[in-house]
Amino acid sequence: MERPRLSYDVLILVLGFSDQRTLARMMQTCRELYGPATNCILQSLVTVRVTSSSILSFLAFLFRDPAHRIPLLRKLEINDIYTHGGDDVALTPDAASSLKHVLDRLAAAGCLEELVLYEPDDLLEEYPELSDTIESFTSLRSVKLYEAGERSVGLLVNLESCLVTVHLMFEYWRGYEEEDVFRNPIALLSHSQHTLRELSLVRGRFERRYVNQEEPTYPNLANLTLYDTDIFDISPFIRAFPRLQRLEIQECNTYWPDHMDLSNRELNEEAQKQHGSWPKLGVFDGSLCSLWELALACPISSLQLTDDDLGEVPPTMAIDVLTAARPNNLELRVCGCRVFLTDEVLRIFRHSMESLVDLQSLRLDLSLAHEDREGDWHEVLDAMVSKILAPLPSLSTFKLTIKCPSIPWRRSVPHHAPADEDSEEPLSPLLQHLADWDQGTFIARACTASQNGTLKQVEIIKP
């Protein structure tokens, strides 16, 4: 019986979904696939490790047909992360020279669009001529620096390309010293101030700046992500990124309510009264506590407050945030279903109804706690519908995601209990309620209870 054959067009389609190892093997099967597989390899992210064997292998591959292959290479990663157990960890001068030759050719071709560097400072310190070559690139649109130090940041400052996206992760082991001024990307990226649209920063440093200090403005930057970067004064960001649409802050400032600094909030409130804030933000994603400290005096269309447990946040803090933001979409994380029976959480919604008059979409990420195992799920649902969903006048979509990270689905059986293969351990009362829960009835009830009949879509995700 003749085996079924795939058409050539189907094989070419399969190449587009294959990893580089599979593509390399397909190159060896026949001449017809050699060229297309090569193209697929070069059009994806190509990784070169800073070892002699990796660099020389890459050089041989690229210069087998340089006129065709060099213009196809659009994304390049140079990875200097130390690999234990290798025989070729040390980079020879000949291999470094070969790497510079490749980069020279890529710079001259003007086709490389994305450059990713992992732990580049040691390499740039030993072979500073590589910095000159990389700085000469004019075609780059995206740069990602991981574990960046002063040398790689200096490279970024002198880069001739006008960048669109930048991801910058500073070295972990460096302390936050006063002289670490190179950690401030507002000053570092001035050469791309008219083209930069997206900036992601890890372990940055920002100091308070005065309004009369000269600093570049990035009129087209829409997305800003900050991770492990404390921000005490929001005004430099408002001036530097006047058209910001999305602000994400993860593990920045104080993200525990007990450690909040009221002086930072007061400073930000006063600065925005004097010098203004953003007209509006499309999305804020991060900690409610951080947002409270920043005291943003602008509406925020979509609030994704997923770093906090709503039950642990002081109600006045959450009310302040919702009052200022007046969101259309709201996402909250809640640990423990019993918080919906407490006045503290219900008070947040009760006192924020005027600010939530335009709220159209609400998502609750509910993680059931160990203390909930004996709780009454139906009582929780009653409070959720009558106290939260029903009073919202414009709510059209509600999504409830339920997780059980700390509650076993089955109760444990004592050691001395006789084994019975046909019997199952009983569910805890709460999980039994969940197992028997008629979601359709709940959805119908929630929609019917809607104050203005606007709630039309309810989605439930449970384990």
Image (tube, rainbow, N blue to C red):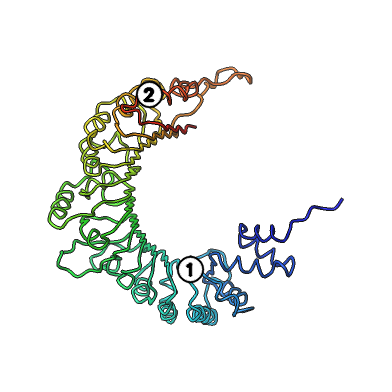
Disc 2 marks which residue? 448
Give the camera-side residue of 246 and 360.
Answer: 360
Give the camera-side residue of 100 and 136.
Answer: 136
Give the camera-side residue of 126 and 415.
Answer: 126
In percent of the image, x 57 and y 71: which residue is there?
54
**Dot 2 alpha-carbon crowd within 10 angstroms: few under 14, some 14 to 19, many 20 or more:** some
Q: Secondary structure at mark 1?
A: loop
Reading the chain from its start, which is encountered first: label 1 or label 2? 1
On screen, residue 423 versus residue 358, left or right, reads right
- Residue 170 position within the rendered picture, expressed as x and y whole percent measured from the top left: 36, 63
**Dot 1 alpha-carbon crowd within 10 angstroms: few under 14, some 14 to 19, many 20 or more:** some
Q: For the residue marked with disc 1, what is the amino acid?
A: Asp
Task: Give the quarter of the image for residue 385.
Answer: top left
Task: Give the quarter of the image for residue 381.
Answer: top left
Give the camera-side residue of 260 and 395.
Answer: 395
User: Which residue appears farthest toward the right when viewing the image?
Assistant: 1
Count the marks: how many?
2
In percent of the image, x 54 and y 80: which residue is there?
98
Q: Secondary structure at mark 2?
A: helix
Using the image, determine if residue 60 lies above or below residue 39.
below
How far apart are the alpha carbons under marks 1 and 2? Answer: 60 Å
In percent of the image, x 42 and y 69: which residue is there?
141
Using the image, determine if residue 336 lies above or below residue 129.
above
- Residue 2 position within the rendered picture, expressed as x and y whole percent measured from the top left: 85, 53
Task: Give the quarter of the image for residue 370.
Answer: top left
On screen, residue 111 versus residue 455, left or right, reads right
- Residue 438 position within the rendered picture, expressed as x and y whole percent measured from the top left: 48, 22
Disc 1 marks which residue? 80
Using the image, determine if residue 372 lies above or below residue 245.
above
In percent of the image, x 20 and y 36: which residue is there?
316
Using the image, determine if residue 250 lies above or below residue 83.
above
